């Protein structure tokens, strides 16, 4: 009798969608979460309904044939970094039966405050303690958000006794963890974490009244968090679950085949990264003015990262603006049509003299440096000209954070392009190839769910 081939499930809980992939088959399902909700606490807040995120996850799992899920022996999980969700252990979810199998739904859980959250002003960030870490603290970081609640709504924190990223929450529910476990990757993204010593800045936090009991236990990136406490859909009870990982690191893991590769990802935001030499240690204190950050990777290694807050979200904002203008003129044109037509028009234009600095969301190293338009000429106001200038600006902004010369001097020989915004935008691709005089290859199968599954395949 032939032995059935085992499989690994990879899950990514992204900013706008959930993706689940099965390896080695490669079968996958994606669902948009549509989870954005208004923030009652702060006008600049960006929050998501955890119930909608888990509903999308459940829909992805339900779409797989049961016989495929019965073969799963390991689960890898990644998700959007920096954000924080709070829950009450023992009451954070309820398990129910459905036609597709056993699944959980959120119960005593807060909204997810995402990485895009803007409630922590520059003034607020200067009022909280400085971290003992190579990583600066920015708005949208988990610890900064907790400080905000501590100072503005302490009664909110009293409702909960655990916190983590959205993917930490999922792992904790699957494994029935009494106290969540967080990878070094996710902990660094929260701030107030020393990645050299692999520990929280507990003394600094405790001294300022921070509720350190909310902080998760730390685990090595790539290690096991636990095993499923019961059958989940048709995934067997006792299946190994990896500690939740950063979506960025997992996307890099899925496509960086050589240490001389740089990876350019443009999805909601944008990142350009390359691998630092083995043995590299980041500085002990943050450089607030530097656009380059160092993200923990695997095996004690680091990635040098230009992490921009302005990527596909800038293009999406431009499309929404055009849609609104057209609606105000009494017309109804779908966003998809507007996007297609503006890209077509931009492909007919070459390098514009119109200059758009597209940083409408600021940058972590320069939060007050917002967008601007210059060199405006009457001859370059067509949709094609403006779209071309906008795409050029997105790439030039990244280039200002990490230049082609820096990549070459660091030994980079090739750029691997990935991300939904880049894959569907030929104008962005052209601007990448203009700005970076290196071979560029584009990968369609690059995603964090695949990377999370690959980690569990290769590293356990």
Image (cartoon, rainbow, N blue to C red):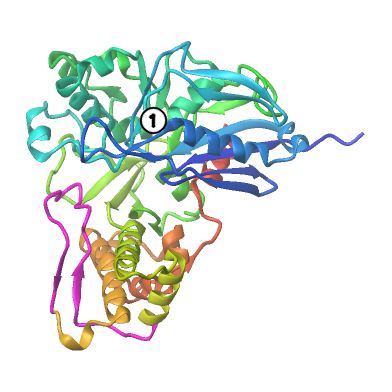
* Predominant SS of the magenta segment: loop
Residue at 46% x, 17% y is 92
Toward the front, the furthest residue is 330
- Image coordinates for residue 114, horizontal then vertical, percent: 33, 38
**Which residue position is annotated with label 1?**
165
**Is residue 317 rendered to the left or right of residue 227?**
left
Q: Is residue 404 visible?
A: no
Give me the residue at 42% from left, 79% from top: 344
Q: Residue at x 61, y 44 (%)?
A: 21
* Closer to the camera in the image, 23 or 384: 384
Instruction: Work out whether residue 206 or residue 46 is closer to the camera in this orientation and state it.
Output: 46
Q: Measured along the vertical axis of the image, is residue 449 above or below residue 3?
A: below
Apparent side of residue 76 relative to residue 359 in the rendered image (left or right): right
Please provide percent x and percent y for residue 215.
Answer: 32, 19
**Which residues are drawn in magenta?**
347-375
Residue 329 percent coordinates (x, y): 30, 71
Screen quadrant of the N terminus: top right
Taking the image as drawn, is residue 258 in sight?
yes
Quadrant position of the C terminus in the picture? top right
* Mark 1, secondary structure of its residue: loop
Could you say which quadrant of the image residue 124 lies in?
A: top left
374 within the magenta span: yes
């Amino acid at each position: 009798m032939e032995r059935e081939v085992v499989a690994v499930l990879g899950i990514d809980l992204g900013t706008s969608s959930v993706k689940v992939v099965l390896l080695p088959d490669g079968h996958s399902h994606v669902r948009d979460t549509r989870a954005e909700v208004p923030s009652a606490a702060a006008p600049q807040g960006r929050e998501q309904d955890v119930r909608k995120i888990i509903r999308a996850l459940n829909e992805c799992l339900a779409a797989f044939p049961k016989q495929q899920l019965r073969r799963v022996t390991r689960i890898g999980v990644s998700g959007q970094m920096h954000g924080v969700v709070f829950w009450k252990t023992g009451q954070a979810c309820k398990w129910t039966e459905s036609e597709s199998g056993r699944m959980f739904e959120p119960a005593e859980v807060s909204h997810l405050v995402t990485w895009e959250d803007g409630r922590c002003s520059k003034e607020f960030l200067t009022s909280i303690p400085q971290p003992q870490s190579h990583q600066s603290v920015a708005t949208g970081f988990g610890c900064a958000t907790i400080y905000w609640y501590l100072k503005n709504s302490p009664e909110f924190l009293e409702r909960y006794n655990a916190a983590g990223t959205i993917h930490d929450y999922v792992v904790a529910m699957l494994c029935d963890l009494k106290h969540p476990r967080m990878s070094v990757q996710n902990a660094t993204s929260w701030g107030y974490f020393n990645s050299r010593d692999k520990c929280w800045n507990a003394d600094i936090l405790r001294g300022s009244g921070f509720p350190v009991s909310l902080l998760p236990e730390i685990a090595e990136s790539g290690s096991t968090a636990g095993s499923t406490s019961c059958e989940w859909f048709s995934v067997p009870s006792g299946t190994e679950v990896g500690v939740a990982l950063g979506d960025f690191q997992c996307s890099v893991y899925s496509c960086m085949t050589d240490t001389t590769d740089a990876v350019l990802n443009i999805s909601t935001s944008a990142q350009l990264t390359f691998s630092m030499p083995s043995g590299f240690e980041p500085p002990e204190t943050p450089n607030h003015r530097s656009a380059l950050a160092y993200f923990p990777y695997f095996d004690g290694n680091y990635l040098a990262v230009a992490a921009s807050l302005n990527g596909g979200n800038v293009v999406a904002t431009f499309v929404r603006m055009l849609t609104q203008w057209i609606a105000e003129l009494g017309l109804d044109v779908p966003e998809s049509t507007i996007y297609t037509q503006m890209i077509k028009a931009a492909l007919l234009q070459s390098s514009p003299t119109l200059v758009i600095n597209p940083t409408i969301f600021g940058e972590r190293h320069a939060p007050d440096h917002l967008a601007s338009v210059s060199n405006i000429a009457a001859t370059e106001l067509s949709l094609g000209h403006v779209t071309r200038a906008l795409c050029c600006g997105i790439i030039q902004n990244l280039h200002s954070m990490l230049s082609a010369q820096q990549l070459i001097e660091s030994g980079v020989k090739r750029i691997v392009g990935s991300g939904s915004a880049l894959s569907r935008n030929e104008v962005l691709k052209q601007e990448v190839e203009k700005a970076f005089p290196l071979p560029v290859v584009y990968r369609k199968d690059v995603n964090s769910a695949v990377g999370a599954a690959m980690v569990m395949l290769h590293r356990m």
